[in-house]
Amino acid sequence: MAAMFRSIPQVFRGHQCASFLLSARMFSKKADEKLALADKVAVVTGSTKGIGFAIARRLAQDGAHVVISSRKQQNVDRAVAVLKEEGLSVTGTVCHVGKAEDRQHLVATALGHSGGVDFLVCVAGVNPLVGSTLGASEQIWDKILDVNVKAPALLLSRLLPHMEKRGGSSVVLVSSAVAYLPVPKLGAYNTSKTALLGLCRSLAVELAPKGIRVNCIVPGVIKTDFGLGEKTLPNMRPELNKIYGLQRLGEPEDCAGIVSFLCSSDASYITGENITVAGFSPRL
Ligand SMILES: NC(=O)c1ccc[n+]([C@@H]2O[C@H](COP(=O)([O-])OP(=O)(O)OC[C@H]3O[C@@H](n4cnc5c(N)ncnc54)[C@H](OP(=O)(O)O)[C@@H]3O)[C@@H](O)[C@H]2O)c1
């Protein structure tokens, strides 16, 4: 009997020891594990603030080297400095996605890191008009379609040879809930965002044989300068309660994890999807 009682602490100690060894093993396994996007290179357009910045930060936190870009040098410098300060691997360059020479320069900068690119995330988008669709001038149409729709395709066509070589490459486009639920006075913008849903599917089919996946996120209203700006939010507000279940506006970070997942090998059987990030959207 005494022996039995003596053995209890031993058993207990043995159990503690075993669980310690187990957790130590799990910890060292965790420490040895590579981050999901380690050794990858990501190009993110429109990434010096808002949704693009949150995506760039998350891809870098998950191990990728990220090339930051937008139209203004000071914005690029600031974003790169902030992320480097956080210990993340980033470089940056100016790229107005509507300008061919800027796109070319962005590709060259990205290739400068390790000679290839794995992910392209096209976030840059504009809405220069609040007004009727038929009142939009040809210049306005050109600007919206050039930046929002043509630029992702033209940039990808330049990156394609370099992405093809890498294996497991992935593209993510950024549409908007207005693609499904047109908001009055944003007609030309709504149309451009609907076009992106089609671009996603066409590119997914076209690039599948090359092993490149193409998906698209479809955000609701996200708290950024653009989302809260006078051109977007006041026009969205009457519709908000009807379509957004979580009863809050989105944060830029709400769009970041899903993009990292879509780039990762965990999403290797997912392509051509338009994924809504809008806090539940039964009417979309
Ligand atoms: N916020 C929302 O509610 C919401 C909802 C659905 C979809 N979206 C889409 O999400 C994307 C990003 O919006 P956001 O809300 O994050 O806006 P944001 O906070 O205003 O940020 C826009 C970013 O894009 C850059 N940019 C603007 N025009 C550009 C161009 N022509 N070429 C390259 N970069 C450009 C800006 O920097 P520079 O000024 O230095 O160029 C900035 O870094 C857009 O495509 C938008 O349509 C937003």
Image (spheres, grey):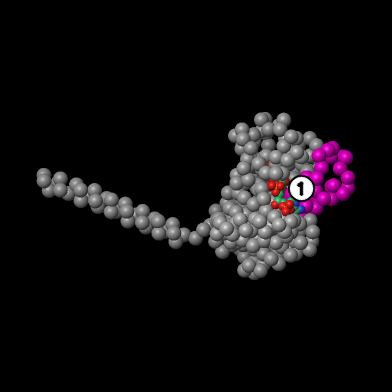
Instruction: Name the kind of residue labelled 1 in the image.
Output: Val
x, y percentage for residue 48? 67, 53
Is residue 148 rendered magenta in the image? yes
Residue at position x 66%, y 41% in the image: 223
Estimate how packed mark 1 is, as few (under 14), some (14 to 19) or many (20 or more) residues with alpha carbons within 10 Å: some
x, y percentage for residue 174? 69, 48
Count the marks: how many? 1
Q: Left or right? Give the position of 130 relative to 5.
A: right
The range drawn in magenta is 124-153
x, y percentage for residue 179? 73, 41
Q: For this rendering, which residue is in front, 167 or 227?
A: 227
Asked whether residue 204 is in view, the answer is no
Per the image, the residue denoted by label 1 is: 126
Is residue 31 rendered magenta in the image? no
Q: Left or right? Give the position of 181 relative to 53.
A: right
Identify whether 83 is placed above or below 131.
Answer: below
Q: For this rendering, which residue is in front, 267 or 183?
A: 183
Residue at position x 81%, y 39% in the image: 130
